[in-house]
Image (cartoon, rainbow, N blue to C red):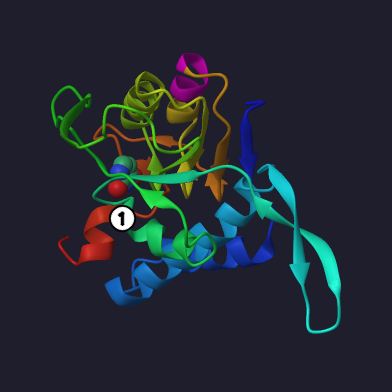
Amino acid sequence: MQNVIVSKHPLVAHKLTKLRDISTEPKKFRELVREIAGLLCYEATADLETMPVSVTTPLTETTGVHLKEKIGLVPILRSGLGMVEGIWELVPGAEVWHIGLYRDEKTLKPVQYYNKLPLDPTVSVCLILDPMLATGGSAVATVDILKNWGVRKIKFVGLIGAPEGIKALETHHPDVPIHLAAIDERLNEKGYIVPGLGDAGDRQFGTG
Ligand code: URA
């Protein structure tokens, strides 16, 4: 698991515990997803390239930096949507490109149903957003899509990873760093992460 970066930040651990709690209602759940996503994004973007710029303060001229790279956020529909706002607060200029994948209940394999990426890439760095890295099928498929699109710098940002999903993503795409709030024990027979937090989509959108 050399590619996995699990946040050690106490705020992340505290908020994740509340997120797991069965009694946390959708409004609070959405708030926590947004906040944890922002904290993880802060860590995941620590190596972004910058370029020097001059800036005039009320007192003098000095040098600072601007981000050099154009960032794309790629939430996997639908549960990745809740992570966008928290990251957009930190990176307001990021483009958001949605990828729709659902997991076939029988095969547990991802099926693509939404992808409106233009022909040529418009960003140089992509953060794939999906709260749960379960089997890894959706994550692997999304990295495939983004690499075919022409993006070379791709990171995965999720809340909880199962060992199975981490292994799948690392095996297929060893160049993609995986940022998580926690690694859990395992997947159950229905493909849910244990102990996990249940269905991240249902819990955000109140559809469970
Ligand atoms: N997707 C979820 O929402 N939860 C899981 O535990 C696994 C996949």
Q: Secondary structure at mark 1?
A: helix
Residue 79 seen from this side = yes
Per the rendered image, the range of residues in magenta is 167-172
Ligand 1 placement by image quarter = top left
Query: Residue shown at 27%/27% (left/top)?
Result: 119
100 left or right, relative to 90: left
13 left or right, relative to 132: right
Query: Residue shown at 47%/69% (left/top)?
Result: 18
Determine whether 123 is above or below 159 in the image.
above
Residue 198: where, in percent of width, then height?
31, 53
Looking at the magenta stretch, what is its main secondary structure? Answer: helix
Q: Amino acid at mark 1?
A: Leu
Query: Residue shown at 13%/26% (left/top)?
Result: 106
Q: Quadrant of residue 19?
A: bottom left
Determine whether 60 is above or below 40 in the image.
below
Q: Is residue 68 magenta?
A: no
Quadrant, the N terminus: top right
Q: In this rendered view, identify the residue nearer to me: 147 or 1.
A: 147
Q: Is residue 168 magenta?
A: yes
Q: Quadrant of residue 135?
A: top left
Q: In this rendered view, identify the residue nearer to me: 193 or 54.
A: 54
Q: In this rendered view, identify the residue nearer to me: 118 or 173.
A: 118
Quadrant, the C terminus: bottom left
Q: In this rendered view, identify the residue nearer to me: 140 or 66.
A: 66
Determine whether 168 is above or below 16 in the image.
above
The residue at the far top in this view is 171
Q: Residues within 10 Å of mark 1 (few under 14, many from 20)?
A: many
Query: Residue shown at 44%/68% (left/top)?
Result: 32
Residue 169: where, in percent of width, then height?
46, 24
Residue 7 seen from this side = no
Q: Give the residue number, with chain letter if any, for mark 1.
A: 81
